[in-house]
Amino acid sequence: MGRRKKEQNVIPVKNLFSLLDVDNDLQDLPDAAKLEKGTKGNKKDRLIRLWRFLYEYTDEKHRITTQEIIKLFEKKYGMEVNRKTVKDDGETLHDAGYSVEINKSANNQYYMTKREFTIPELKLLIDAVAATQFISKQTTMDLTDKLFRLMSVHQAQEMGSYVHVDYGVKADDDSIYQVIAAVSEAISKNKKIRFLYTTYNANKELVIKNDGEKYEFSPYMLRWNMDHYYMVGYSDKHEKVNQFRVDRVYGDVEITDEDAVPKPPDFKENEYGKNIFGMMNDGKPVKVTLRCNGDRMKDIIDVFGINVETKALARSDRFDVHVPVYLSPNFFKWIFGFHGEIIIKSPQKVVDQYLQSLNEALEVYEKDN
């Protein structure tokens, strides 16, 4: 299992991306494994080499001319091409849908237009990878490098000048990959799994839960919630649908020959853990009414979405929210964090449960202080 630690250093992404060290001057391109000197090569080979170069080194702002392509093939690949060959190959790539554009002139210009992802999309993906706690620092670097390779070198240089990766809290290793692979295989085969599960004691020591015994589990799905990755399914020990954090699984996951327990009729994958309180629930969601100060509408929308049911109160800047929630510790902690600006109005049993939690916490403080 990968334990997490805080990394203080912040490294510019551009230092992670090997292509940024390549000199873009065609005269200084490093030699590749050449074909026999002077050969024209076959068309398939030329097309692949031309497309790869256009993909890596050109974009809407950075184009390459026919003469530069001729020099490139001679110097880098040892291949002889001419203006007609370049024109025909460029048009072949364009007609095949490879997003190669040609600005026709006395010396045609060639460049890539559309790519798999836009620059803003790649920026979002890079930030998401950086923020993910359950992957290691090295894997974060590797994934970031791969995302940068989806841009041209010039776009990567530009983004690398202002995008930085703060490694924050990261796993020590990538054992989670093996866990995810095993759980995914079990789901596809409809089989139970066995695994050890861990926590930390007061001495910050990793300990095995369940008295050191393996849990037997029928996985239904994997779900990302609140910066953690969970497997959701039926737990034989708990005799209900439950969830386990993937990064807390210890050692190998055993896929058994026993068929998984069928999903309960009321289990809905798209609803389970839908809001931020759902992955630590005990039972089914309960419809509650929250009374909120007017300036807390943004917080309500952040958690429950723009379509949440609200009602403004007359002669007041406050409003009520009617929403189903899981009565989990996460929910009560969330309410407490607003210091009375969001309160539980009903049902009374939920109010009483929240007050009981507060009183129990207060008693602990009074005993220890």
Image (cartoon, rainbow, N blue to C red):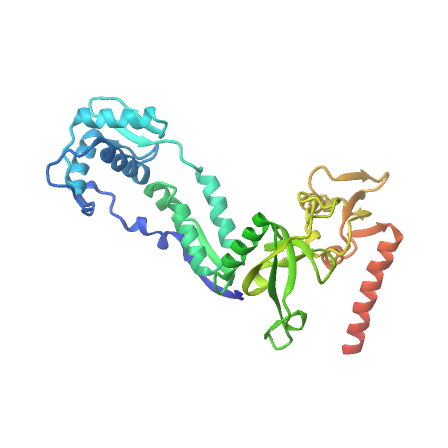
Q: Is 49 above or below relative to 128?
A: above
Quadrant of res 316: top right
Across and down, in percent, residue 203 comes to 61, 77
Across and down, in percent, residue 64 comes to 25, 33
Q: Nearer the viewer, residue 213 or 12?
A: 213
Q: Residue furthest top?
A: 105
Across and down, in percent, residue 148 comes to 39, 46
Q: Residue furthest left?
A: 38
Q: Residue furthest right?
A: 348
Q: Which residue lies at the image location 33% right of the left edge and 43% below the top edge? A: 153
Q: Which residue lies at the image location 84% right of the left edge and 63% below the top edge? A: 356
In this rendering, would 201 be left or right of 93? right
Q: Nearer the viewer, residue 19 or 74?
A: 74
Q: Which residue lies at the image location 57% right of the left edge and 54% below the top edge? A: 183
Q: Is 63 above or below relative to 326?
A: above
Q: Is 362 above or below relative to 273?
A: below
